[in-house]
Amino acid sequence: MGHRHPVTRVVLAVVGSVVLLIGLALLVLPGPGLLLVLAGMIALAAAFPALQRYIEPVRARAMQAAESSVATPLRIAGSVLAGLGLIGAGVVSGLVPQLPLAGWATGVSLIISGIVLLGLLYYSHRRVRSGSAYASGSRETR
């Protein structure tokens, strides 16, 4: 992989940092926090290749966390609410300039993070559901 343009590195670093921080927050809040930490680390590793060595251990833990994040309907509901809350906070941040750190740059980051969270939640749910079909002994005809 060649050297990235400095602007690309800055964008990857900012996006990766925001997603990583949201993931860290979701480690204690409902949601697939480790999956967002992983996504943030992948973006950061694209900007800073030295971070690549930390991805695989986090990936393994993230897959375990993905299964846990959709283990109960309450966890799924909490995760969906967190994703929708991020999207709502992003819209509010863009529309209400009096808030601290308000503006569309922050708002878009929050909206993207909420969409990523919902996407990861969907992925987690599908992954666990397809795995549980094999665990229970039911198989589809191929």
Image (tube, grey):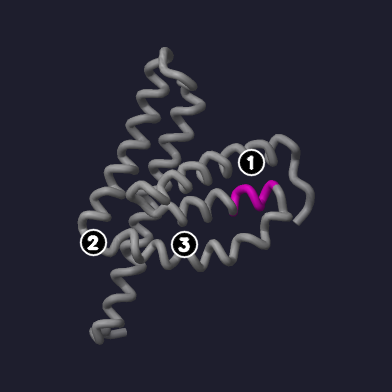
Q: Is residue 136 left or right of residue 123?
A: left
Q: Quadrant of residue 81?
A: top left
Of circles 3 and 1, the one toward us is: 3
Residue 122 visible? The answer is: yes
Residue 140 visible? The answer is: no
- Alpha-carbon span between mark 3 and mark 1: 21 Å
Rendered location of residue 11, percent (x, y): 63, 37
Q: Which residues are magenta?
A: 42-47
Q: Which residue is mark 1?
A: 13
Q: Which residue is mark 2?
A: 72
Assign the C terminus to one quadrant of the image. Answer: bottom left
136 w.r.t. 59: above or below: below
Assign the N terminus to one quadrant of the image. Answer: bottom right
Q: Which residue is mark 3?
A: 62
Give the residue displayed 44% in from the left and 41% down from the top.
113
Give the residue displayed 58% in from the left and 52% down from the top.
41
Q: Quadrant of residue 98?
A: top left
Of circles 1 and 2, the one toward us is: 2
Rendered location of residue 134, percent (x, y): 30, 82
Rendered location of residue 35, percent (x, y): 46, 56
Q: Of callouts 2 and 3, which one flags the residue occurring earlier in the amino acid sequence?
A: 3
SS for dot 3 = helix
SS for dot 1 = helix
Q: How many marks?
A: 3
- Alpha-carbon span between mark 1 and mark 2: 34 Å
Rendered location of residue 102, percent (x, y): 46, 20
Q: Indicate the amino acid at tag 1.
A: Ala
Q: Of callouts 3 and 1, which one flags the residue occurring earlier in the amino acid sequence?
A: 1
Q: Is residue 115 left or right of residue 16?
A: left
Asked if residue 30 lies in the magenta stretch, the reply is no
